[in-house]
Structure formats: structure tokens, C-alpha cells
Image (cartoon, grey):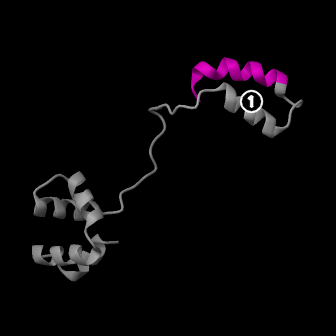
Amino acid sequence: MNPNYLDIVSTVQKYTNGGMEKREVFNLYQTMLPKRNKYYKWIKSKTTSKYTDSLLIAMGTYFECSTEQAHNYLEMLPKKEVKKLLTTIGFQDKTIKEMLK
């Protein structure tokens, strides 16, 4: 929560504590506080990449691009084509299976 709104919340809590239903309190806060998203550096993203680093590096070296662009290529290519590309690069079936997990 934004520290600038703590005073507002503590003031409103004095009057809503026990006297209003939870839904009404929620609606009150929802209308009072701003709705825009704010970046807080202490909140970390929970997303992880679907592809292993070794796969991204291999595709990046094959296409001669960054790993971010390789990620975009992997999103567009079907899995069969990726397997075919990895075999032409020279990877064995066992390592290809590990890369595509």
C-alpha cells in the first residue's frame, strides 16, 4: 500500500470499525482510494520463463539474436519445428527433451 494513503485509511477505520459490513467498507475504500497501478520496488514478479536458459541461448545463437528475441521466436514456432532446429544444430534427443520441459 502507498504510505501516502495510510492517514486516510486510519481515519476511515475509526468510523467503520464494527459499524459497517465488510462489503460496505470495501466499497468505501474502493471509491476513496485511487485506482491506478503503482510500481513498488519491493514487490517482485512471480512470472518465470517457460523455456530453459540453455534453450534460449541455443536458439539465440542459431538465429544470431538476443535471448529475448529467441523467446519471441519460440512463442511463434511450433514444438516440432523447434525440435527439428535443435537436431540440425547438433543436440541429441535426450538434451532436447531436457530443454523443452
Helix, strand or loop for the magenta stretch, by majority: helix
Residue receiving disc 1: 28
Q: Is residue 15 left or right of residue 33?
A: right
Q: Residue 47: image x %, image y %?
A: 43, 52
Q: Residue farthest to the bottom?
A: 93
Kind of element beneath mark 1: helix
Q: Is residue 59 above or below residue 89?
A: above
> Which one is nearer the viewer's eye here, 82 or 3?
82
Q: Is residue 62 above or below residue 85?
A: above
Q: Quadrant of residue 19?
A: top right
Residue 100 included in the magenta stretch of the image: no
> Which one is nearer the viewer's eye here, 87 or 23?
23
Q: Quadrant of the N terminus?
A: top right
Q: Magenta residues, as a range?
A: 1-15
Q: Is residue 97 left or right of residue 30?
A: left
Q: Is residue 32 left or right of residue 19?
A: left
